[in-house]
């Protein structure tokens, strides 16, 4: 086990550039690896890394404002793009970027519609809603950053620390009957999760729609008996011993996703730059897959109220199977495959039923796959990029 840990650390150092290939080979041979296995491993790294050393996009420089949402797990790749300045690698030379940080998603939509922002990082609900506003502006979803088939980004139910200890989520459901549950907004990913919970179990509970910023304080003050929350707030609530997780969305087949959206007029005028941004984000997603600690350090600079360990748990931590936890937290998705399109279609129906949108289907091209498909091809990447699997706290390494 010690050798495996040392090898994992050594591979991480190579990927981060902390050791040279020569040093890596020497130390790996000392750990007992054969020359043939090392050659095969290094060959598997060579093509993608060489492809990622791409030249900036051609064309005139752009001045772009990016709306991002660091207090939502799905916006983490944008944080990596910002702090590693990956946009400088792929946008036309001379371009400049301003960052518009928000604590919830809707202001990002409003700023894109007003052309104050040209690019935005959003959760699934506001991203989908934004594409239905073509009477104001033509907004497109151009990339899916993270996709959770297990609902382990937004689909969490928590109770106060003082609530009874439940042996499993079935016992929790019996306790929830007739009680109140706070949900982070009508038509939100949380509303989708709680709707699935109540609809599939027949539990009768009083749903209170709350601003996401007061979910934690509402739980602390016991204004509600339970809450739905999304990461990283979930991990902070647990680590501060305010509450604990009693159910995850996987129990009721809930899925979550996060998207990059762009104004179509920005894409049309600056196609190379728009594709360059997507390339930068794909590189950021790859970084997230292989550099957990560095990723949450960047995130911590945007979220000073969160500890590094809390942020690590919110992306890379595992969840107890007795509350529905599954091994796979999220997928570094990128493209619009059949499973993602099915998820989008389901949400359009849900949002229509909730009277959040008026349309039965999204406008033509709302899921605008051209940029991410071309970006991945030009970088030599296969989509999806990989899966983030939950790990025990012992895997947290500085």
Image: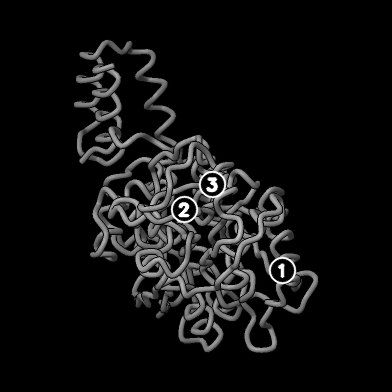
Q: Give SS at disc 1.
A: loop
Q: Residue at x 64, y 74 (%)?
A: 129
Marks 1 and 2, how far apart at CA: 21 Å
User: Which marked residue is nearer to the observer: mark 2 or mark 3?
Assistant: 3
Q: Which residue is mark 3?
A: 172
Does residue 264 lie above or below 334 as drawn? below
Q: Nearer the viewer, mark 3 or mark 1?
A: 3
- Mark 1 — residue? 365
Determine the residue located farthest toward the right in the rendered image. Answer: 360
Q: Residue at x 50, y 60 (%)?
A: 228
CA–CA distance in space, label 2 to label 3: 40 Å
Q: Is residue 124 left or right of residue 68?
A: right
Q: Nearer the viewer, residue 350 or 51?
A: 350
Residue 82 showing in the rendered view: yes
291 on left or right of 6: right
Q: Secondary structure at mark 3?
A: helix
Task: Tell me the CA gap for discs 3 and 1.
Answer: 43 Å
Q: Is 102 placed left or right of 24 in the picture?
A: right
Q: Are marks 2 and 3 in contact (CB under 8 Å)?
A: no
> What residue is drawn where x is 70% and y is 70%?
351
């Amino acid at each position: 086990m010690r050798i495996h840990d040392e090898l994992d650390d050594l591979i991480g150092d190579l990927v981060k550039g902390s050791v040279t290939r020569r040093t890596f080979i020497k130390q790996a041979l000392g750990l007992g690896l054969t020359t043939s296995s090392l050659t095969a491993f290094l060959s598997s790294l060579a093509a993608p890394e060489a492809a990622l050393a791409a030249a900036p996009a051609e064309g005139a420089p752009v001045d772009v404002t990016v709306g991002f949402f660091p207090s939502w797990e799905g916006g983490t790749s944008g944080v990596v793009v910002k702090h590693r300045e990956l946009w400088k690698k792929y946008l036309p030379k001379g371009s400049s970027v301003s960052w518009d940080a928000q604590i919830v998603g809707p202001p990002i939509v409003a700023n894109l519609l007003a052309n104050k922002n040209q690019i935005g990082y959003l959760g699934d609900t506001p991203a989908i809603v934004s594409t239905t506003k073509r009477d104001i502006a033509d907004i497109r979803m151009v990339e899916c950053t993270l996709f959770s088939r297990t609902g382990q980004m937004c689909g969490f139910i928590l109770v106060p620390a003082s609530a009874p200890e439940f042996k499993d989520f079935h016992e929790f459901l019996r306790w929830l009957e007739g009680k109140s549950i706070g949900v982070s907004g009508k038509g939100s990913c949380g509303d989708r999760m709680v709707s699935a919970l109540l609809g599939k179990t027949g539990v009768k509970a009083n749903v209170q729609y709350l601003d996401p910023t007061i979910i934690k304080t509402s739980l602390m003050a016991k204004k509600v008996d339970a809450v739905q929350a999304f990461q990283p707030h979930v991990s902070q609530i647990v680590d501060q011993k305010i509450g604990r997780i009693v159910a995850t969305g996987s129990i009721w087949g809930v899925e979550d996703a996060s998207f990059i959206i762009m104004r179509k007029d920005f894409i049309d005028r600056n196609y190379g730059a728009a594709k360059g941004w997507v390339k930068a984000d794909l590189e950021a997603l790859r970084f997230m897959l292989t550099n957990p600690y560095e990723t949450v350090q960047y995130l911590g600079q945007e979220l000073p109220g969160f500890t590094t360990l809390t942020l690590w748990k919110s992306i890379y931590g595992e969840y107890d199977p007795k509350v529905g936890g599954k091994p796979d937290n999220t997928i570094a998705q990128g493209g619009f495959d059949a499973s993602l399109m099915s998820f989008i279609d389901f949400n359009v129906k849900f949002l229509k039923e909730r009277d959040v949108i008026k349309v039965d289907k999204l406008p033509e091209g709302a899921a605008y796959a051209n940029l991410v498909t071309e970006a991945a091809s030009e970088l030599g990447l296969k989509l999806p990029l990989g899966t983030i699997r939950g790990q025990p706290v012992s895997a947290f390494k500085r």
